[in-house]
Image (tube, rainbow, N blue to C red):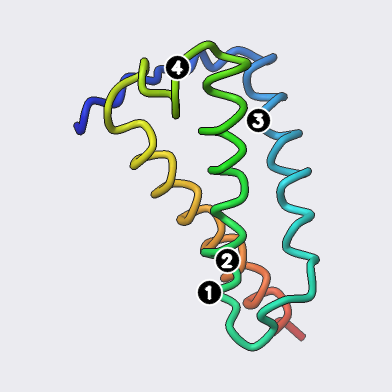
C-alpha cells in the first residue's frame, strides 16, 4: 500500500536493537513540555524518531536513498504515521498509568 517495501527479519538482533531504540526514544517523554495536552505532546514527540529515521537512519545507515524512498514512495508517509501513532499511544499509556492509585 502506497509503495512501502520494508520487511523486517525478526531476528534476536533486530528485535533487541528496536527495544533499545524504543527505550532511548521513550526517555523523550520525560521532557516537561505540553503537560496539559498529553496527546499533542505524544504526536509532537513521535515526530522526533521519524525525523531521525528518514533523515539519518534510512538514507545513511540503511542506504535507502533520500527519505528512504528506495524502500518505496510511501516510506515517509507510513513512517510518519507509525511515529505519531507510537507517540500518542505512549503518552496515552503514561496518562493512564498516572491515574492508577
* Of pointers 2 and 3, the one earlier in the residue sequence: 3
- Name the mark on residue 65: 4
Q: Position of residue 57 (x, y in %)?
A: 60, 25
The reply to whether callout 1 and callout 2 are in contact (CB within 8 Å) is yes
Q: Give the labeled residue for mark 1.
A: 39
* 54 over 90 or under it: above or below: above
* Of pointers 1 and 4, the one earlier in the residue sequence: 1
Q: Which image quarter: residue 49?
A: top right
Q: Nearer the viewer, mark 2 or mark 4?
A: 4
Q: Which image quarter: residue 46?
A: bottom right
Residue 32 versus residue 15: which sits nearer the camera? 32
Residue 11 versus residue 2: which sits nearer the camera? 2
Q: Give the labeled residue for mark 3.
A: 18
* 91 over 71 or under it: above or below: below
Circle 4: element type: loop
**Image quarter in which the N terminus is found:** top left
Q: Position of residue 86 (x, y in %)?
A: 53, 53
Q: From the viewer's perspective, is 80 left or right of 88?
A: left
| Disc 2 to disc 3, C-alpha distance | 19 Å
| Disc 1 to disc 3, C-alpha distance | 23 Å
- Name the mark on residue 42: 2
**Image quarter in which the C terminus is found:** bottom right
Q: Position of residue 61 (x, y in %)?
A: 62, 16
* Of pointers 2 and 4, the one earlier in the residue sequence: 2
Circle 1: element type: helix
Amino acid at each position: 500500500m502506497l509503495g512501502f517495501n520494508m520487511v523486517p527479519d525478526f531476528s534476536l538482533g533486530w528485535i533487541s536493537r528496536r527495544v533499545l531504540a524504543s527505550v532511548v526514544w521513550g526517555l523523550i517523554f520525560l521532557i516537561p513540555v505540553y503537560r496539559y495536552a498529553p496527546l499533542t505532546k505524544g504526536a509532537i514527540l513521535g515526530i522526533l524518531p521519524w525525523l531521525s529515521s528518514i533523515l539519518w537512519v534510512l538514507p545513511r545507515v540503511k542506504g535507502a536513498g533520500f527519505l528512504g524512498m528506495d524502500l518505496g514512495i510511501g516510506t515517509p508517509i507510513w513512517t510518519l504515521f507509525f511515529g505519531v501513532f507510537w507517540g500518542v499511544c505512549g503518552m496515552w499509556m503514561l496518562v493512564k498509568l498516572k491515574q492508577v492509585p
